[in-house]
Image: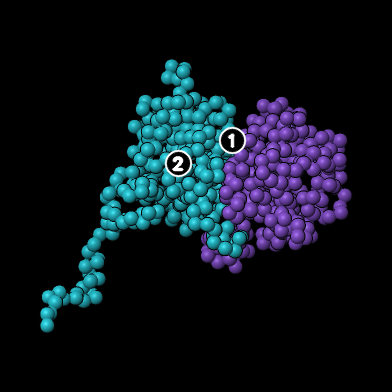
Chain colours: A purple, B cyan
């Protein structure tokens, strides 16, 4: 792992050069078929979901994604889901449970989209449902933080049996900018905030928040090693009886 | 020419007189702006004009809400790993003001002889924020309730995550959620009472997971902070967009209940959910 300060890690996690959620899905999953909408009132562009094969095994994948250009970023609110996005993800995860498919959740978000409509449409409730229902799904559930893992908007899809992080990714209770402004009323102390938040993969691995660090893949890289790694991880989880799977998942979060 | 007998006191004299008036003798209601003598707010601390419930400590609420209340896990407090001076000073002050050791008071209460596992968040304890120990106490409360077949009533009041505890604060959302779900799967009743203010990570977890979600009148209920939203949309959000009444209109709250009616409403709801085999 290349040595970087916490703030350099923040910058790398936000870099537009990073492999995107979409690229990961297309590189990892064959026969991917995207499924749209939350069956209630919308189809949030910041969340992608669908079914496909991981080394010939069917699975459900949901992901929070940023855009690759300004136009896409505006549609996707720079990777910040609306409540409809969380409801879509949860709908697809429940569907996965019905068809006994494991779930892969990819997370790249600065946080849920903070606007008036999101409040009106119950963003708090949507995340709460993802946590309550998502954590009890009777199928293997792996979460991967791709770039940014910001706050409640990230943990909504990061409460699986295993949580992995890419080398250049961060996971925190709020952005270092937000932390600096709340703690010191000084948003220029971002670098110090990044240190204090302990948001880098190595620090989070130490404290047991995540299970493993995944080395970076660039856009266009062959994802076979990652595919095989995930395939093996899912297989290990699949071999557990359902009760044991749920017991271990409970234990994982109970200790915090 | 008539001369007024009234002599305007000097500035100094006025200042002296002002200093003799005790603080907090009058109160202004933030909702209806009525001004009244503080004592008229009564033991439930409500506005005598519109019924708005002022923020109160968890201990006070426990006292007037339940017929009896036996606190549990009273010694659980901020883990020793946190040593930041400023943070510790805040916690020490909070303990003094609230008389509890974390931002939630948990225990077994009774209402009309019905037992209920109750959690009451304290907005005066580091803004009712969700610390690791807060999450632990709430999780234990749900676990106890599940073990003992008890309903849970949770009064939420929180500024959200506890920044000083970083990612561990975030993890409480997951930890508590699964305890709520285990209680849910056991077929037990969970009632939430949203109090002023319920925001952030608490809104995005156990505050929105109740079978029945009540709210006190005019309570602030939301996820994102007003300032953050303002910066995103580059204009002022509507005045009451995060008021309980607005959230009710959007379908996320079952009913708004003034504080003075809460005891009665909770008693009724608990009675409606009493199982035939309960109490033997």
Q: Is residue A145 visible?
A: no
Q: Nearer the viewer, mark 1 or mark 2?
A: 2
Label 2: few (<14), some (14–19) or many (≥20) C-alpha neighbours in 10 Å: many
Q: Which mark is residue B192?
A: none
Q: Which residue is mark 1?
A: B178
Residue toward you, B276 or B19: B276
The local secondary structure at tag 1 comes to helix
Q: Residue at x 43, y 43 (%)?
A: B216
Please determine whether, in this image, residue B279 is positioned above or below residue A218: above
Q: Is residue B199 left or right of residue A28?
A: left
- Which residue is the site of mark 2? B256
Disc 2 element: strand
- Quadrant including the C terminus of chain A: top right
Q: In the image, residue A173 lies at what x, y percent?
A: 60, 52
> Mark 1 to mark 2: distance in Å?
27 Å
Q: In the image, what residue occupies the spot 28% across and 59% down? A: B23
- Residue B62, given in percent of the width and then of the height, sits at 37, 38
Residue at horizontal 62%, vertical 57%? A175
- Mark with earlier residue (1, 2): 1
Q: Measured from the top left, where is residue B198 in percent x and y?
A: 49, 47
Q: Is residue B60 left or right of residue A188?
A: left
């Amino acid at each position: 792992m290349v040595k970087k300060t916490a703030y350099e890690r923040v910058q790398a996690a936000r870099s537009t050069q990073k492999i995107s959620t979409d690229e990961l899905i297309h590189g990892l999953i064959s026969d991917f078929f995207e499924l749209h909408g939350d069956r209630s009132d919308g189809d949030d562009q910041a969340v992608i979901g669908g079914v496909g094969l991981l080394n010939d095994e069917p699975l459900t994948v949901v992901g929070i994604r940023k855009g690759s250009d300004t136009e896409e970023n505006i549609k996707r609110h720079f990777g910040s889901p609306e409540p409809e996005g969380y409801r879509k993800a949860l709908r697809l995860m429940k569907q996965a449970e019905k068809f006994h498919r494991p779930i892969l959740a990819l997370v790249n978000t600065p946080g849920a989209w903070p606007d008036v409509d999101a409040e009106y449409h119950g963003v708090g409730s949507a995340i709460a449902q993802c946590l309550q229902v998502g954590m009890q799904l009777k199928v293997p559930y792996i979460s991967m933080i791709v770039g940014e893992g910001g706050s409640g908007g990230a943990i909504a899809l990061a409460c699986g049996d295993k949580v992995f992080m890419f080398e250049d990714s961060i996971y925190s209770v709020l952005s270092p900018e937000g932390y600096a402004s709340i703690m010191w009323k000084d948003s220029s102390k971002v670098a110090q905030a990044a240190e204090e938040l302990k948001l880098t993969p190595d620090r989070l691995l130490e404290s047991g928040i995540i299970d493993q660090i995944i080395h970076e893949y660039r856009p266009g890289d062959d994802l076979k090693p990652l595919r095989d790694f995930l395939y093996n991880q899912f297989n290990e989880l699949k071999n557990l009886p359902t009760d044991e799977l749920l017991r271990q998942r409970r234990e994982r979060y109970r200790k915090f | 020419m008539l001369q007024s007998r009234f002599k305007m006191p000097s500035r100094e004299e006025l200042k002296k007189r002002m200093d003799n008036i005790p603080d907090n003798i009058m109160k202004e209601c933030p909702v209806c702006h009525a001004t009244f003598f503080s004592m008229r707010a009564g033991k439930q601390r409500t506005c005598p004009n519109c019924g708005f419930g002022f923020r109160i400590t968890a201990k006070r609420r426990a006292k007037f809400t339940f017929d009896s209340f036996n606190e549990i896990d009273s010694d659980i407090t901020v883990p020793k790993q946190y040593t930041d001076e400023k943070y510790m000073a805040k916690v020490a002050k909070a303990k003094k003001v609230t008389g509890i050791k974390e931002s939630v008071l948990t225990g077994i209460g009774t209402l009309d002889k019905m037992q209920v596992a109750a959690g009451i968040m304290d907005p005066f304890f580091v803004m009712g924020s969700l610390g690791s120990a807060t999450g632990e106490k709430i999780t234990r409360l749900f676990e106890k309730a599940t073990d003992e077949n008890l309903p849970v009533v949770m009064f939420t009041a929180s500024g959200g995550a506890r920044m000083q505890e970083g990612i561990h604060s975030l993890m409480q959302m997951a930890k508590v959620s699964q305890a709520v779900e285990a209680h849910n799967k056991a077929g037990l009743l969970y009632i939430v009472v949203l109090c002023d203010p319920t925001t952030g990570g608490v809104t995005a977890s156990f505050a929105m997971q109740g079978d029945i979600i009540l709210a006190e009148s005019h309570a602030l209920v939301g996820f994102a902070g007003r300032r953050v939203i303002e910066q995103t949309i580059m204009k002022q959000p509507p005045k009451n967009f995060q008021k309980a009444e607005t959230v009710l209109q959007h379908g996320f709250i079952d009913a708004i209940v003034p504080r003075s009616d809460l005891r009665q409403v909770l008693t009724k709801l608990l009675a409606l959910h009493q199982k035939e085999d309960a109490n033997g």
